[in-house]
Amino acid sequence: MELLFIIKAAAIGVVEGITEFLPISSTGHMIIVGNLINFKAPTYNGAYIDMFEVVIQLGAILAIVVLYWDKIFNSLKNLKPGKWGFKLWLTILVAFIPAAVLGLRFNDLIKSKLFNPVTVACALVFGGFLMIYMENKYRKGNSTNTIENVNLVQAFKIGCFQCLSLWPGMSRSASTIMGGWVSGLTNVAAAEFSFFLAIPTMIAASGWSLIKVNVSMNISQIIALAVGFIVSFIVALVVVEKFINFLKRKPMRVFAVYRIFIGAIILILYFAKVINI
């Protein structure tokens, strides 16, 4: 049972590493996969599972810090008014605020009502159709091709779109990238701004969750936590680089189609009583 639990933790780490920065919802996939493989086993209390999901998300964030370390480090060296680093992190802060305010206000309600496979599947389908519409309408002709050129108005629009990701299954990445399209960002710029916005957003969300969690762990739980973190970090390192290369060549419609397909299959199987999740 202990070894099986650690294997399941590694599997969830893979899911998080793959999906965190793709526009397909990491939270949604962790909820669905976690239910399918019975990761929420009775032996392990819900508080631990909540903390596990938070910690492996930090593994994915660490991958962004590593991949973009030169730009992050240089921006922090130029963190003075009038310097490009100050402007960059000011836009990140402006984009961070809307979802932070709503998340703090409605966190408990969201946790109790929306963290289940059916609502996640609905979000996957809805978000998939919304991505197709937004990409067709807004992506072409956008001229802001670097995150250093994002202005405060664009940042606020992206932040408002990030609020959509409070619905598990919508995807923080998809929501912010769609906000980037509407604001005039190219595919790559929208994705990179989404990556940078993830740093304060997920650290804040993780810190808030960890403060609220009070759980003692046995040795297998500690090992599972470490395994999930490391696996998430390694997988995210690979996925983010490939995702950026993909965006330089192709539209994101393939992710939207995937979302719609997965969400529809889950809903069909659930309402046909083939699966009980």
Image (tube, rainbow, N blue to C red):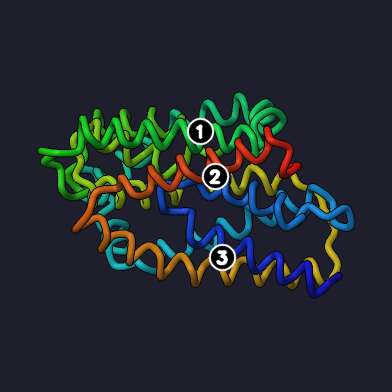
Taking the spot 25% from the left edge, 37% from the top edge, the residue there is 135
Q: For numbered disc 1, what is the local secondary structure?
A: helix
* Disc 2 residue crowd, few under 14, some 14–19, many 20+, Cα 10 Å: some
Q: Earlier in the sequence, mark 3 or mark 2?
A: 3
* Residue plotted at (70% across, 53% down): 36
Question: Which quarter of the figure has residue 277?
Answer: top right
**Mark 2 and mark 1 in contact (Cβ < 8 Å)?**
yes
Query: Disc 3 designates what residue?
Result: 14
Task: Report how far apart the C-alphas of labels 3 and 1 lie in the structure.
Answer: 27 Å
Measured as percent of width and height from the top left, residue 74 is found at 26, 62
Numbered disc in front, either 3 or 2: 3
Q: Of label 1 and label 2, which has the lower sequence position?
A: 1
Give above or below for 262 relative to 41.
above
On the picture, is 155 further left or further right than 117? Answer: left
Residue 212 shows in the view: no
On the image, which quarter does residue 221 sit in? bottom right
Horizontal arrangement in the rendering, residue 168 relative to residue 158 (left or right): right
Q: Which residue is mark 2?
A: 204
Label ID, residue 100: 1
Q: Which mark is residue 15?
A: none
Q: CA distance from mark 1 to mark 2?
A: 8 Å
